[in-house]
Image (tube, rainbow, N blue to C red):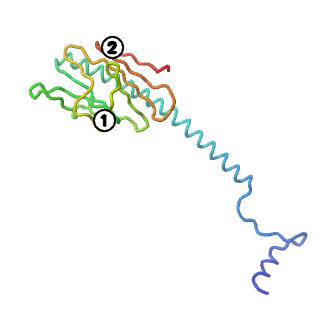
Amino acid sequence: MDRRDDRFIQNMNLNGPITRPQRGFTLLELMVVLVIIGIMVSFAVLQFGDEGEKQLQQEARRLGTLVSLVREEAILESRDYAIGFWQGGYSFYSLDENEEKWHEILDDPNLRPREIPEFMELLLELEGQLVIMEIQPPEKPQVFMLSSGEMSAFVLQLSIRGREGLPKEIRFDQLGRINHEEQTN
C-alpha cells in the first residue's frame, strides 16, 4: 500500500461515508471573530473620543489661565509680553527694550513653549481675520499683552482634527477679560 491508501483508510468512517480532514474555519467562527473585533474597535473609538474631549477642555483651560497669568505679570513687572501661535502649539515672548526685539521665553517653567497633541488643531482670529499659522514657532508673536494692562483682542478655537464637533473657543477682549465657550454653529 502506498501513502494515499493509508490516508484513505485513516479517513474512512466505519459507520458511513468517507470524511476528509477539516481545514480552515467555519463561517460561524469567522463571524464570531468579526463581532469581537467590532466591539473592541467601538470601545477604542469611544475611549479616544472621551479622552480627546477631556484633553481639549484641559488645553483650553490651561491656555486661558496662562494668558491671564502673563497679562498680570506684564502689569506687575511693567514689562510687555506676547504669545506666538503656530500649528503645533504656542510660545510666550518678552520684549527686550534695549534691542527692541521679541525673545521667546524658554527658561520659565510656567511660560515655556507648549505643544498641543497631534490630534488637536488651533485656529487664531485677530480683528476678525483668520491668521495663517506657521509650522514652527513664529519669530514675531501675534498677540500682545502690554504693561498698561491692554492686550490684543483675539479668538482662539481648539478642535479635534478631522472630527465633526464643537470646538472649544477662547475669547479675550482688549481689557484681558476671558470668555470660554463651545461653538454653537
Q: Residue furthest left?
A: 98
Q: In the rendering, at what x and y percent does residue 109 appear?
A: 26, 32
The answer to whether marks 2 and 1 mark residues whose Cβ atoms lie closer than 8 Å is: no
Residue 94, given in percent of the width and then of the height, sits at 19, 27
- State how far apart marks 2 and 1 are (Cα): 27 Å
The percent position of residue 3, horizontal first and vertical second, equals: 75, 83
Residue holding disc 1: 134
Label 1 Cα crowd, 10 Å radius (few <14 / some 14-19 / many 20+): few
Instruction: Please tell me whether mark 2 sits on a helix, a strand or a loop.
Output: loop
Instruction: Out of 121 and 14, give the one closest to the viewer.
Output: 121
- Front-most of 87 and 79? 87
Q: Is 54 left or right of 90, judged from the image as shown? A: right
**Vertical placement of residue 162 versus 5, above or below:** above
Q: Nearer the viewer, residue 182 or 6?
A: 182
Secondary structure beneath label 1: loop
Residue 32 picture location, percent across and down: 70, 49
